[in-house]
Image: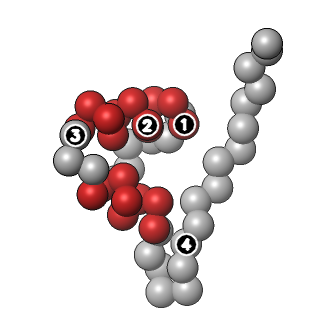
Amino acid sequence: MEVQPRDVQLYITVDGRIPFAEWLESLRDRNIRAKINQRMALPDLW
């Protein structure tokens, strides 16, 4: 199975919050956070 790149767009609420980033920050395990960022190819912005 060939890997297909995806375009990730973060949802931003009307008041400027980013729920995904808030959830990611709430994870206590930094290793899990790093794996999610790596898997999604997101820059470490949070």
For discs 1 and 3, the disc positioned in front in the rendered view: 3
Asked if marks 2 and 1 touch (Cβ < 8 Å), the reply is yes
Q: Residues within 10 Å of mark 1 (few under 14, many from 20)?
A: few
Describe the element under mark 4 as helix, strand or loop.
loop
Amino acid type indicated by mark 2: Ile
| Residue pointed to by mark 1 | 40
Above or below, 34 relative to 14: above
Above or below, 45 relative to 42: below
For discs 4 and 3, the disc positioned in front in the rendered view: 3
Above or below, 22 relative to 39: below
- Say which label, 3 or 2, has the lower sequence index: 3
CA distance separating discs 2 and 1: 6 Å
CA distance separating discs 4 and 3: 24 Å
CA distance separating discs 1 and 3: 17 Å
| Residue pointed to by mark 2 | 36
Describe the element under mark 2 as helix, strand or loop.
helix
Q: Which mark is residue 23?
A: none
| Residue pointed to by mark 3 | 29
Between 15 and 39, the one lying in front of the other is 39
Image coordinates of residue 28 in percent, x first then y, are 20, 47
Amino acid type indicated by mark 1: Met
Q: Which residue is found at the position 46% from the left and 60% from the top?
A: 20
| Residue pointed to by mark 4 | 12
Q: Residues within 10 Å of mark 4 (few under 14, many from 20)?
A: few
Question: Which quadrant is the N terminus positioned in?
Answer: top right
Amino acid type indicated by mark 3: Asp
For discs 4 and 2, the disc positioned in front in the rendered view: 2
Image coordinates of residue 25 in percent, x first then y, are 30, 55
Q: Quadrant of residue 17?
A: bottom left
